[in-house]
Structure formats: structure tokens, C-alpha cells
Image: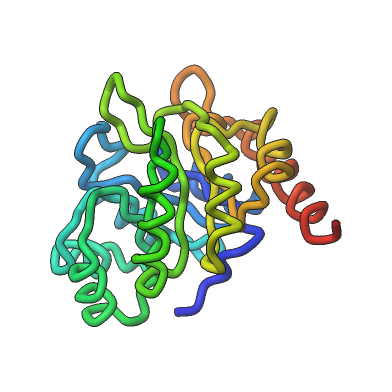
Amino acid sequence: MTLALRNTVQLAGVADRAEAEMMADAGVDFIGFPLRLAVHEEDISEDRAQEIIKHIEPPPHAVLITYLSRSTDIASVCRTLKVYAVQLHGDISTEELIALRNLEPQLCVIKSLIVADGSEARLRLDVEELSPYVHAFITDTFDPVTGARGATGKTHDWSISRELVEHTDTPVWLAGGLTPENVGDAVDRVHPAGVDAHTGVEDASGRKDPDRVKRFVTEAKAAFERMNTS
């Protein structure tokens, strides 16, 4: 399945079907389902995720977000969930990426690039090595306190993400601490192919806030329009 990976908005974390439908109505392009995680607690079980995904009429497209690093494991979960996109946050070898592409040639593979202090040179090398085997990258924030590689609610040095955008023709999405208040500025400064948010559009209870979701999508899409016409 060919998916549009530019000018896109992804929101990660879904509580139930009603929340997924609300995000779809707001114009979200991708909904991320974090499962098989190394650090964070999962939002919902795989059974509940499968039930929600079954009722999502693309767009938005469902995306498995995971720390799995073995191609067979990744392919198995994607088949079970019936998703056609996966976002890989764990350390995965080039050999396993090649094996995944061979196992699931229709699967859209998005690889995270975790931004930390002093990571610029390594990330450039990662982009050069992995670009032939992935459809997109997503830059996210490393939290040295918890060890979390993304879903930290924290921004990172956007100049590093901007450099990676300019370093490759592969689409680069931006994540990490994005909110309705800062996503427009983030797109203006980084020129990413897409943006992603999780906690930045939630209310105090941890559920997606409809107003914040709508504002996030509106601000992001307006910034993409500015970016494309400048």
C-alpha cells in the first residue's frame, strides 16, 4: 500500500474507538498505536487496538509504534493488527530492516531518529545507511532521566532535525513535545514532511482533547501550506 508521507499529521495513543473517530474527523492522517514497548506503559492492549483498527476507515491510517527489533516479530504483529505502517523506535540492524522489507514488501516502514546531546554525527550516518530501506524517518527526543526514546513530552534541538531534513530526500517527520501552541513554529523552522504528537494534545486525564486535536491539525496544515508556497 502506498501512503502519502508528506504534509501529514500523526497523533499517537488511542483510548478507544470514539477517540479514534474524533481524531479522524479532525483531519488526522495517521493514528499511532504504541505496543510492545521497552520503556513506556502501553495505552491499550493489543486486543483492544485490533478492535479499534478494524473500524478505522483510512484515512487516517493505523500505525504500529513499537520497540521490536526482529523482522519476524514486527511482521507478525503487523499482520495480527492488519496495519500497513510501522514506526520503529528500537535499535534495529540493517539486516533486519532488509528482512522486514522482504517479509512484508507492502509495509510502510518509518524509522525513529532519537535526538540527544551530541547525536548529530551519528544521526547523519544513520540516515545515510538506512534511507534505502525505510520510507520515512521521524525525529524524536531522548530523555536521559528515564531512558525513553520518544513520547517524552519534551522538545529537542530543532536545528538538528532541520539539518537531517536537508541531508536526505527521504521524508522526515518531527516529533517531541509538539503542541497546538508550537507546531506551527516547528514546521516553519524545521520544514518536516510530517508532525507527530502524543501528550501535547491530551487533557489532564490523559485523553485526547478534541479542541487541542483540532487546533493541532489546523496549525500544522496551515504551516505546511506556508512551507509549500514559500
Name the residue at 69% across, 28% down.
Answer: 181
Q: Is residue 223 visible?
A: yes
**Residue sitting farthest toward the right:** 230
Q: Position of residue 143 (x, y in %)?
A: 35, 26
Task: Give the side of residue 73 with respect to residue 19, left or right.
Answer: left
Q: Which is nearer the eye, 118 or 178?
A: 118
Q: Position of residue 222 (x, y in %)?
A: 79, 48
- Residue 99 against residue 119 in the figure, above or below: below
Q: Which residue, as the protein is rendered here, is positioned at the far front?
A: 121
Count the labels in the image: 0
Could you say which is closer to the camera, residue 25 or residue 147?
A: 147
Q: Is residue 98 above or below residue 39?
A: below
Left or right: where 197 falls relative to 38: right
Residue 55: percent from the left, percent from the top? 43, 61
The percent coordinates of residue 159 (x first, y second) are 59, 39
Looking at the rendered image, the quarter that the N terminus falls into is bottom left
Residue shown at 29%/40% (left/top)? 44
Residue drawn where x is 48% and y is 26% of the image = 154
